[in-house]
Image (tube, rainbow, N blue to C red):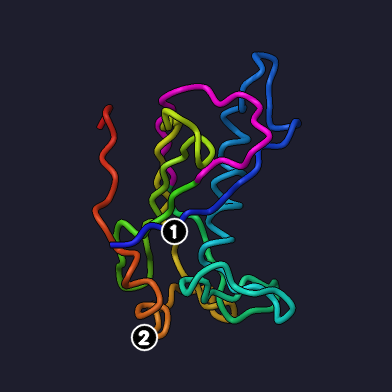
């Protein structure tokens, strides 16, 4: 299993009154990493990985809907100028859904490396014209297969 390493920057506006990344902002950081990892860029941008096969444009044939999210905060994230190392993989590849797993680490090169957050997002692929879930295509399944690994386990489950 291979993990995607998605460098994701913390914005100043992601901080709260306690001077660490706000819990709601963490969802945005995970969204940015997920889009970079799995959504295909437009023709003018090189894909970040071979896993970037979903068409995320508003007029695409597929919508990606969030069915579930779970986060476990392990340490507060301060403002960092270097991007976080968000490691992303697929914890489960179903018929019409996939579970995206994340570990949010300190910037690459930080010694010792620190794990800040673990998270999982269940995404359902939906046909835009019918509103019904659609099966994961052979192309998507082949693109994501190298990134399928063990799903996360959370402490409080």
Picture coordinates of residue 85 (x, y %)?
51, 44
The residue identified by callout 2 is 138
The residue sitting at the top extreme is: 18
Pick the front one: 147 or 22: 147
Pick the front one: 68 or 121: 121
Query: What range of the chain is rendered magenta?
Result: 69-85
Picture coordinates of residue 33 (x, y %)?
55, 53
Task: Determine the secondary structure under disc 1.
Answer: strand
Pointer 2 or 1: first along the chain: 1
User: Callout 2: few (<14), some (14-19), or many (20+) C-alpha neighbours within 10 Å?
Assistant: few
**Residue positioned 53% across, 65% down in the render:** 64
Q: In which quarter of the image is residue 81?
A: top right
Residue 5 vs 106, above or below: the answer is below
Please indicate whether residue 28 sits to the left or right of residue 138 in the image. right
The residue identified by callout 1 is 4
Please indicate whether residue 157 sits to the left or right of residue 85 in the image. left
Q: In which quarter of the image is residue 70?
A: top left
């Amino acid at each position: 299993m291979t993990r995607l390493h998605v460098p994701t920057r913390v914005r100043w506006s992601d901080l709260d009154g306690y001077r660490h990344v706000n819990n709601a902002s963490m969802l945005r950081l995970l969204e940015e990493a997920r889009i970079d990892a799995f959504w295909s860029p437009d023709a003018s941008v090189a894909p970040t990985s071979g896993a970037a096969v979903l068409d995320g444009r508003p007029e695409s044939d597929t919508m990606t809907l969030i069915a579930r999210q779970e986060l476990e905060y392990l340490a507060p994230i301060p403002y960092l100028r270097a991007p976080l190392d968000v490691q992303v993989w697929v914890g489960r590849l179903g018929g019409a859904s996939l579970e995206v797993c994340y570990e949010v680490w300190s910037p690459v090169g930080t010694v010792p490396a620190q794990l800040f957050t673990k998270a999982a997002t269940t995404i359902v692929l939906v046909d835009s014209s019918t509103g019904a879930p659609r099966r994961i295509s052979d192309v998507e399944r082949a693109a994501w297969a190298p990134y399928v690994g063990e799903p996360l386990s959370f402490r409080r489950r």
